Image (tube, helix red, strand yellow):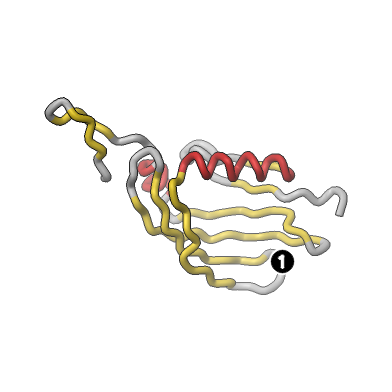
């Protein structure tokens, strides 16, 4: 349907993939940014809390950061707006954005002349 392009919004300042992404090109750039950030990003469990637009979905995520190697388990609540049978907006809500952002940062130090990755 013309005029209905999906968008994905996120936390702009803290997460490497945060911001507002418009249209198919924006969604593609969002997934490229997610892929660059996470070595693994699994939607371990999803519970649909509504069955009409906006959909509300509680998702349990298991992820591993490319930068730090740190593994996290965390929830995301998303609202998904559907119009004309198409997704027009996805809006994620994170419980602890600071912890997720921290895991996205590289964490190395010198120890006996060898770089060692530290998972905090």
Residue closest to the far front = 114
Side of 118 where 71 appears, left or right = right
- Count of marks overlaid on the render: 1
Q: Which residue is mark 1?
A: 53
Image quadrant containing the C terminus: top left
Image location (x, y in percent) of residue 92: 56, 54
The residue sitting at 71% across, 42% down in the picture is 22
Side of 59 where 26 appears, left or right = right
The residue sitting at 71% across, 66% down in the picture is 53
Image location (x, y in percent) of residue 96: 41, 52
Q: Nearer the viewer, residue 76 or 64?
A: 64
Image quadrant containing the N terminus: bottom right
Residue 31 lies in what quarter of the image? top right
The residue sitting at 50% across, 64% down in the picture is 59
Q: Nearer the viewer, residue 103 or 28?
A: 28
Image location (x, y in percent) of residue 113: 16, 25
Q: Nearer the viewer, residue 101 or 106?
A: 106
Image location (x, y in percent) of residue 77: 53, 61
Instruction: Determine whether 45 is above or below 106 in the image.
Output: below
Instruction: Determine whether 79 is above or below 118 in the image.
Output: below
Side of 11 where 88 appears, left or right = right
């Amino acid at each position: 349907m013309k005029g209905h392009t999906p968008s994905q919004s996120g936390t702009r300042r803290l997460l490497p993939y945060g911001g507002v992404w418009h249209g198919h090109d924006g969604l593609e750039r969002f997934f490229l940014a997610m892929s660059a950030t996470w070595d693994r990003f699994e939607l371990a469990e999803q519970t649909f809390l509504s069955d009409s637009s906006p959909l509300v979905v509680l998702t349990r995520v298991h992820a591993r950061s490319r930068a730090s190697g740190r593994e996290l388990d965390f929830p995301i609540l998303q609202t998904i707006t559907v119009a004309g049978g198409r997704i027009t907006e996805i809006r994620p809500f994170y419980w602890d954005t600071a912890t997720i952002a921290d895991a996205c940062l590289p964490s190395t130090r010198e120890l006996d002349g060898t770089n060692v990755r530290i998972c905090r």
